[in-house]
């Protein structure tokens, strides 16, 4: 993999791979969100599971996600906003493009992250246009 799937031009191993594969803690909500996108691309569901807390973690179905990913080709990620509101609360607005079952989809979300015990965690997401297909 030449460039990291998250959209940065760094190699995966020097970008999101350091969090996904080497266990380093993502330093910001944006870094965590980008690494979670990359984990979807490379199919690392364990990383996704480990980086969630609260309702998001309770509702995560690893088997269902694994089945869904078999029909998905990730195309791009664009971060439109990333803010740390307090030392323990951050938000990221992003747009992810992917193809599923031959159809192009765009997912826009405002993700909420909490800092706990030295790590950022994904806790909730508000869809801004849930999985709208764009033919």
Image: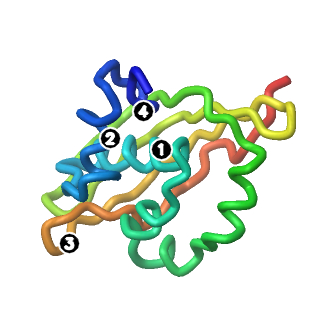
Q: Earlier in the sequence, mark 2 or mark 4?
A: 4
Of residues 68 and 122, the one drawn nearer to the viewer in this rendering: 68
Q: CA distance from mark 4 to mark 3?
A: 24 Å
Q: Which mark is residue 6?
A: 4
Q: Which residue is mark 1?
A: 37
- Identify the element where label 2 is drawn: loop
Q: Nearer the viewer, mark 4 or mark 3?
A: 4
Q: Residues within 10 Å of mark 3 (few under 14, many from 20)?
A: few
Assess whether mark 1 and mark 4 are in contact (beta carbons under 8 angstroms). Answer: yes
Task: From the viewer's perspective, tell me whether residue 128 is left or right of residue 15.
Answer: right
How far apart in space, not on screen, are marks 2 and 4 (Cα)?
7 Å
Q: Which residue is mark 3?
A: 116
Tag 1 near tag 3, CB within 8 Å: no
| Residue sitting at x 39%, y 62% | 122
Q: CA distance from mark 1 to mark 2?
A: 9 Å
| Lower position in the chain sequence, tag 1 or tag 2 | 2
Which residue is painted at 19% across and 55% down in the image?
Answer: 24
Residue 16: mark? 2
- The N terminus, quarter of image: top left
Q: Earlier in the sequence, mark 4 or mark 3?
A: 4
Image coords of residue 38 (percent x, y): 45, 42
Q: Are marks 2 and 4 in contact (CB under 8 Å)?
A: yes
Precedes in sequence: disc 3 or disc 2: 2
- Are the residues tagged 1 and 2 within 8 Å (C-beta)? yes
Give the Cα distance between marks 1 and 3. Answer: 21 Å
Quadrant of the frame with the C terminus: top right
| Mark whose residue sits in front, 1 or 3 | 1
Of labels 4 and 1, earlier in sequence is 4
Residue 78, x across and y down, in percent: 47, 28
């Amino acid at each position: 993999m030449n460039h990291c799937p998250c959209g940065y031009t760094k190699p995966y191993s020097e970008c999101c791979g350091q969090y996904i594969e080497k266990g380093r803690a993502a330093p910001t909500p944006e870094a965590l969100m980008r690494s979670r996108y990359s984990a979807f691309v490379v199919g690392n569901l364990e990383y996704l599971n480990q980086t969630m807390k609260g309702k998001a973690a309770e509702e995560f179905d690893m088997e269902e996600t694994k089945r869904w990913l078999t029909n998905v080709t990730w195309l791009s990620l664009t971060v439109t906003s990333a803010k740390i509101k307090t030392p323990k609360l951050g938000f990221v607005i992003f747009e992810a493009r992917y193809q599923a079952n031959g159809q192009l989809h765009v997912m826009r979300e405002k993700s909420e992250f909490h800092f706990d015990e030295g790590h950022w965690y994904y806790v909730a997401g508000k869809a801004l246009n849930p999985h709208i297909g764009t033919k």
